[in-house]
Image (tube, grey):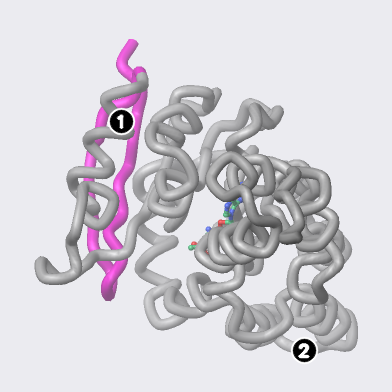
Amino acid sequence: MPRKADPAGIAEQVLASPKYRHLDEALVRRMAAEAAGRFRDHNEAVKYAKRKLHQAFGAFLTGEPASAVRGCVDAIRGGADPREACRTAMRAHASTAERISWLDPFYAKVSAWCAPVSSVVDLACGLNPLALPWLGLPPDATYWCCDIDRELVAALGRLGEVFPVQVRAQACDLLTAPAVPAAELALVLKTLTTLEQQRGGAAGAVLAALDAPHVVLSLPRRSLGARRSYVDDPEALVSRAVSATRYRVADRAEFGDELLCHLVRDG
Ligand SMILES: C[S@@+](CC[C@H](N)C(=O)[O-])C[C@H]1O[C@@H](n2cnc3c(N)ncnc32)[C@H](O)[C@@H]1O
């Protein structure tokens, strides 16, 4: 008889796989519950949960992000040029790697919009904390970042050893009410699409919960042919997400295939 799908059994099997064993358990359990709600058969439900995890996480891996960060920290401690070491490590995460060619103008624009800031939160950060040398934060600034890969966030926490900034990295599922600290700047880079794919309305809910006077968000620009719904249309996704908040889009910029928006709060 086929095994009946139950959330605990699905989560256990997913967490046993080498690719997903480092993932935040709350996220895996949420996806397992969704899978059990859709499929009665255990194997079908596991397949669905893994497909959703690939879309949210696995699709962005181009190497081993955690070991890339550890290697970067060790290289800088050993005297390597920090920007060079960070650029090299960024290649282990596809989304962050895509930004390497326009890191200078990208962060010059972020500074022109928001500086000076001494506290930053970076949501669903991937390897973007490796851009710390481009952010130009003052000594003792705070940088809080989160993602769903526990091994990665443990490695990112070590960036404070080589940069004069207090770095705090946390594993969290942004869809389950995480405690994102207040900050002067929130970075939400190439993240709205994946949040919205996990739950309609999640992008707006995450933005609405932010306590930051400046938000910089970015989205990959897509060709018209690749747009199947508002989730694939960057402008539509931004206006829908922002309409659920007290923010408004103050300015926009484009670098390569990345659309950048500066959000500010009214009043
Ligand atoms: C497209 S990547 C962007 C990475 C980074 N912000 C950048 O632009 O360089 C999306 C990131 O969202 C993370 N992620 C996906 N679902 C998440 C969730 N529910 N909570 C927190 N992070 C999530 C993934 O692990 C991945 O690193």
Q: Residue 246's x, y, as percent?
A: 35, 18
Residue 217 placement, left or right of 266:
right
Q: Mark yes or no: residue 160 visible.
A: no
Q: Which residues are magenta?
A: 246-267
Residue at left offset 46%, top offset 27%: 205
Which numbered disc, 2 or 1, marks the residue closer to the eye?
Answer: 1
Residue 7 placement, left or right of 58:
right
Residue at left offset 42%, top offset 49%: 197
State the residue in front, 237 or 37: 37
Residue 70 placement: quadrant: bottom right
Above or below 96: residue 172: above
Residue 142 placement, left or right of 240:
right
**Quadrant (top left, top right, bottom left, bottom right) of the N terminus:** bottom right
Residue at image mark 1: 242
Residue at left offset 34%, top offset 10%: 267
Q: Considering the numbered disc 2 on the image, is that residue within a helix, a strand or a loop?
A: loop
Residue 64 placement: quadrant: bottom right
Numbered label attached to residue 157: none
Q: Residue 57's x, y, as percent?
A: 59, 64
Q: Residue furthest top?
A: 267
Residue at image mark 2: 80
Spatial CA distance of label 2 from label 1 is: 41 Å
**Label 1 Cα crowd, 10 Å radius (few <14 / some 14-19 / many 20+):** some
State the residue in front, 182 or 126: 126
